[in-house]
Amino acid sequence: MKKLILSFAMAALVAGGAVAQGPAKQTAAPQAQAKSGPAISFESTEHNFGEITQGDVVEHTFTFTNTGTQPLIIDRVDVTCGCTSPDWTKEAVMPGKTGFVKAKYNSAGRMGQQKKAITIHSNTGEPTYVYIVTNIKEKSASAAKAQ
């Protein structure tokens, strides 16, 4: 029985060593390589506002680069609710140039943890998503703390 267990252990070690000796993986980031056609690459795909008070209006601008080989055109930007208002670069973004997607968030009538998706539809063929995150505290509780 000991020989059988030892044989399985040795086989596992040999198989693990063979896998570890596989071909070297490509180390370049996929976003760094120019894609044929337009390609959108965001500096950051999520922004956390931290704690805000109910009723606060906050905004964040997401910056992106066209890492493709053809002009990038944003057709539309969708949000998940009326609490978020988007704005974006309306003209074509040439390869290597930057553009923006801005999200303005109104926390009126909201409480607690919030994560809102912003969907960017462009000529890349696939929608791209960025997110805003916040924790909304009750207005009266914040005012009581300040006194």
Image: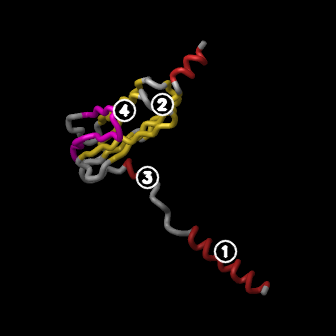
Residue 117 lies left or right of residue 96; in this view the side is: right
Picture layout, residue 30 above or below residue 45? below
Label 4 neighbour load within 10 Å: few <14, some 14-19, many 20+: some
Q: Residue at x 51, y 33 (%)?
A: 135
Q: Residue at x 69, y 81 (%)?
A: 8
Q: Label 2 belongs to which residue?
A: 49
Q: Amino acid at mark 4?
A: Cys
Label 4 vs 2, first from the N-terminus: 2
Picture layout, residue 33 above or below residue 54? below
Which quarter of the rendering shows the C terminus? top right
Numbered disc in front, either 4 or 1? 4
Which span of residues is magenta-colored? 70-89
Q: Secondary structure at mark 3?
A: loop
Give the label on residue 83, or none: 4
Return the x and y of residue 140 as percentages of the image width and height.
Answer: 53, 20
Between the residue at mark 4 and the residue at mark 2, the CA separation in whole angstroms equals 15 Å
Numbered disc in front, either 2 or 1? 2
Between the residue at mark 1 and the residue at mark 3, the CA separation in whole angstroms equals 30 Å
Q: Label 1 belongs to which residue?
A: 13
- Asked whether 37 or 27 is in front, the reply is 37
Q: Secondary structure at mark 2?
A: strand
Label 2 vs 1, first from the N-terminus: 1
